[in-house]
Image (cartoon, rainbow, N blue to C red):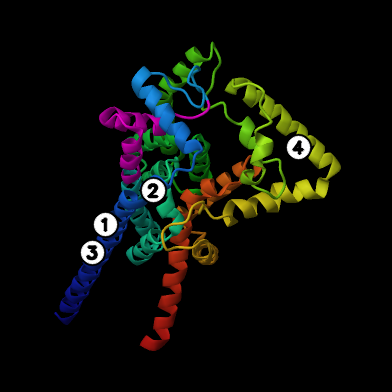
Amino acid sequence: MYADSGRRGLDRLEGVKELNNKKWLAVLLLGAFLLKCLLVLLHGGDYDYGSDDRGYLESARILAEEGKFTYNDPDRPTFFITPALPGVLALVYKATGSLTATAQIFRILQAAMVAVALGLLFLAARRIFNERTALWTVAISSFYPPLWLMSLFIFTESMFLLALILLLYTALRAMEHPTGRWAAAFGLIWAAAVYVRPTIALWPGLIFLYYLYGAKLPWRRLVRCGLIASAVFVLCLTPWWVRNYEASGGHFIPLTKAGGNPLLLGTYPFTVPALFMEEQKTWHTTNDQWINDEQDTARAKERIKEGFATKPLLYTAWYTVGKFALFWGDVFYWMALPGIPLVAAVLYHYLLLAAGVAGLRRCWRLPGAQLILLLFGYLSLLHMIYLAHSRYSAPLMPLVAMFAAAYITGRLDRKRRPAAS
């Protein structure tokens, strides 16, 4: 009888803790969202970077008004970006008829995307670790300054963060329940993520190989689920492939034709593109992006070949340690938030990285953690080949926060044990 009453007491205590965690989660997500909305209303127009953001907005306007998908050249169809972001912007523009209003509304939508992404991150972290660690993950991410900046710039980062966390969560659920339904859901979200940012395209293949060789799942079921996910993915990407084939005059373009410029930008050792903007203006002699991409690719290959031949140590260091350090060490804080100086954002970033590495060293054997480690390795390697950029690593930082949270909660637990004993 005493054992039963004690067990019921523990169950009630756990229920209270779970309820409190959910309340804190709601406070964090709703509070951050409302503050971002206020920031958008007061200062949203100040966060016009004058780069890709203007290109996306103009692409959306032309798509809404003329039904043509273009980018940086209104007279030619584009094959250099995927349509998810311009498509959503075009829907907002159709409703408002104003690019200024479209930008402001989309900034609020981006704040909502980040809030939903962090809610999904909580669910994913709870599956990999526990609810307490999941709450710490959301708290750390909610105060990370670049994540606020992601809601203000009209870039792909917020939308990609949502797609990425949703893809991770679906992968975890599919690992627990390898059914056709979860495989189809994974294929659908995989396609959606590629429509936002094509660089994610190969990560699901690595997940499949991980399951095939590392997970204790019947291989027949695994292959069946893999085929279902791939079939859904192909079905969703087929309209894009058909459009590209017809618009390009018979070329098969599976994702985008935009590898030349980032490949070329990445050939300048130990620097970032913003530091040689004037030189970039001299690269192109035509406004035809197709020709420019081919010229950029040829110039990049020439620079790589010459660089490794004449300065082998410099280029070896750049294409290994240098790009890796830049990818993870550079901070996506291109414009300051009100009251938050650059030094605060940089300090937060490096504390987060340090705690994340410490947590990853302790937890990397967990199956869910290994999926994230595969993602980190895949995107790091990809951007070490092309362009290492803080924009591209920013959506990964909430996942780093998951390991930082595991490290922090582990330290707190170890401090409590001696006191309890």
Q: Which mark is residue 304?
A: 4
Q: Quadrant of residue 350?
A: bottom right
Identified by mark 1, the residue type is: Leu
Structural distance between the alpha carbons of marks 4 and 1:
48 Å
Q: Residue at x 43, y 47 (%)?
A: 47
**Which residue lies at the image location 60% right of the left edge and 43% below the top edge?**
383
At horizontal 33% and vertical 49% (from top left) the residue drawn is 40
Whether the residues at callouts 4 and 2 have beta carbons within 8 Å, the answer is no
Q: Who is closer to the viewer here, 255 or 81?
A: 81
Query: Which residue carries the number 2 mark?
Result: 151
Say if the magenta span includes residue 89: yes
* Between marks 3 and 2 in the image, the one whose residue lies nearer the viewer: 2
Q: Position of residue 183 (x, y in %)?
A: 37, 36
Q: Magenta region: which residues? A: 80-108
Q: Position of residue 151 (x, y in %)?
A: 39, 48
Label 3: how many residues lie within 10 Å, few (<14), some (14-19) or many (20+)? Answer: few
Q: Earlier in the sequence, mark 3 or mark 2?
A: 3
Identify the residue at the far right of this view.
310
The residue carrying mark 3 is: 23
Residue located beneath label 1 in the image: 30
Q: Residues within 10 Å of mark 4 (few under 14, many from 20)?
A: some
Q: Which one is earlier in the sequence, the residue at label 3 or at label 4? A: 3
- Identify the residue at image location x=17%, y=73%: 8
